[in-house]
Image (cartoon, helix red, strand yellow):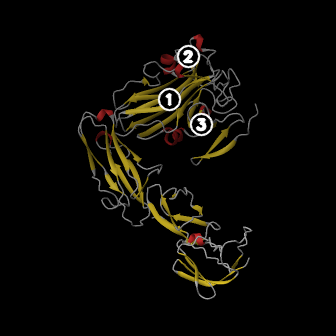
Amino acid sequence: MKLLPKKSLLILAISAFITCNSFAQLITSTMTPAQLVQNVLLGNGIVATNITYVGDPNAIGFFKGNTNLGLDSGIVMTTGTIFAPDGPQGPNNSSGAGTDNLQPGDAYLDQIIAPAQTYNAAVLEFDFIPSSDTLKFRYVFGTEEYMEYVGGGFADAFAFVLTGVNVAFPATNIALIPGTQTPVTALNVNANVNSQYYFDNENPPGTTIQYDGFTVVLTAKQKVECGKIYHIKLVLADALDGAVDAGVFLEAGSFASSNPIDLSFDIAFGNNDSTLYEGCSSASIDFVRGQNFLNQLDTVYYTISGTATNGSDYVSIPDSLFFNIGDDTLTMNIIPVLDQISEGLESVTLTIIPKGPCTQAPPVTTTIYITNVDPITLTLSDDKTICTPDESANLLASATGGLGTLHYTWDNGLGTNPSATVSPSVKTMYKVTVSDSCDNMQSDSVIITIICDLVIPNIFTPNGDNTNDLFIIANLEYYPNSHLQIFNRWGKKIYDSPDYQNDWNGSNYSDGVYYFILDSNSKLYTNFITILR
């Protein structure tokens, strides 16, 4: 297996070392125990102190990468090393990868989990204060001992041991098979036992992780008392000997405890993240309290801040909400006011300061932003005059402003493109409507007028050869009810048609020059016409 050279990487302003190979996507690096806990592992609602680590310094670190673990990043602890070629990086090309750190084991694992003498323990511990009634975090356990060694009655072991510091809570392993009090171990979760929680990384061999098998993503969780101090011991060790490694992966940001009242919001318009648009969208902010608080009445007070003005830029909201017994969620709406004022981006921030036993917990806050929507400005091509069927007109609409994608809709079946080509036979008005994602609309129209100049000949030859046999006035069809009168050289009217249809053939009249008067569309045309056979 060809390895890439080690290289330095700056993570959180410290120097770390990374190693990876050309086959695996798992990347590992070293960080201090405090950085691993404070900057990687901890999520919301946890205050951690007294962070310690005992074990080989290369047996713990940060991981990230595109793997089949089901976790994107977090803390990795092993009984050997986190670095390739002996670490957890794939591919799975060895049946017994690992390294012996010559480190001691752990008494809790010896007596409670293995049960056997353990070696190469990696132990990360810290005190913490939860801000709600529940602690939880997500993890994956894997080992090279799957499945060759599990039949022998022993396997590498790990535990998450929770203990109360200023609250009565005996040392308890919370790494349990879901819905049971059975510890998660390679003996209890494998291809034969509780297999729904097991992932076979050996058949076929995985490309991103070295271990022969590992658990699916599991959640360690425990009811706790908010505001109390607890101690957690995250420990992993080899059983019986120091050969063949195991590892635990702890998901970044998952070690969390939600506050007694949590805030979340949903924007009732598209995918706007946290931004509302005046006259278009609203936000539903949910106040959710923990299950341990449902049996009491409670009034939740919060501060309202931000650059937007309550009752002016958005519909007025109160500064508190009242929970009845049994209520777990209350919803408040932020509805922006369409004030037609261009004010830029404004904010509404709600902040809950925890009270009672959890006053040391961080404030719960959420921020919604409000912005105005510029009106739609529509520009449309000018009215046009054409003469069909020889001519057509190009219609072009162009709009700015609005929100999101602008949609064009033409009447007369012209479709939804900004432009269209038309060739009407009569004077026609074409209307286009532009709408945005907020259903704001702008209408405008263009008129296509049919004006074809009359082309009147000065001679025609009614000799029966089907060529120029009639007195035809070009474009006369666009001027209905045109009145034609023909006079001979002595001024006698010889032909009169109040709605001339281009059908006079001069029959019964000799060759010569005649005079005509055409009244078409309130306009008089007069001239001479010659009959020549």
Residue 233, given in percent of the width and then of the height, sits at: 47, 29
For marks 1 and 3, the one nearer the N-term is: 3
SS for tag 3?
Answer: strand
Which quarter of the figure is the N terminus placed in? top right
- Disc 3 marks a residue whose amino acid type is Phe
Q: Are marks 2 and 1 in contact (CB under 8 Å)?
A: no
Q: Is residue 488 above or below residue 24?
A: below
In the image, residue 470 sits, relative to residue 301, either above or below, namely below
Reading the chain from its start, which is encountered first: label 2 or label 1?
A: 2
- Horizontal side, residue 254 vs residue 454: left or right: left
Neighbourhood count class around disc 2 (C-alpha, 10 Å): few under 14, some 14–19, many 20 upward: some
The part of the image, by quadrant, that contains residue 472 is bottom right
Q: Nearer the viewer, residue 97 or 280?
A: 280
Q: Which residue is mark 1?
A: 234
Q: Secondary structure at mark 1?
A: strand
- Residue 76 in view, yes or no: yes
Q: Residue at x 55, y 16 (%)?
A: 117
User: Dot 3 surroundings within 10 Å: few (below 14), some, or many (20 or more)?
Assistant: many
In the image shown, does 88 or 372 lie closer to the viewer? Answer: 372
Nearer the viewer's eye, disc 3 or disc 2?
3
Q: Which mark is residue 179?
A: none
Q: CA separation, marks 2 and 1?
A: 18 Å
Q: Are marks 3 and 2 in contact (CB under 8 Å)?
A: no
- Which is nearer the N-term, disc 3 or disc 2? 3
Q: CA distance from mark 3 to mark 2?
A: 29 Å
* Residue furthest to the right: 2
As measured in the structure, the alpha-carbon distance from the residue carrying label 1 to the one carrying label 3 is 17 Å
- Amino acid identity at mark 2: Gln
Q: Residue 48, percent across and down? A: 44, 39
List x then y, in percent, for residue 389. 63, 66
Disc 1 + disc 3, Cβ < 8 Å? no
Reading the image, the residue beneath label 2 is 117
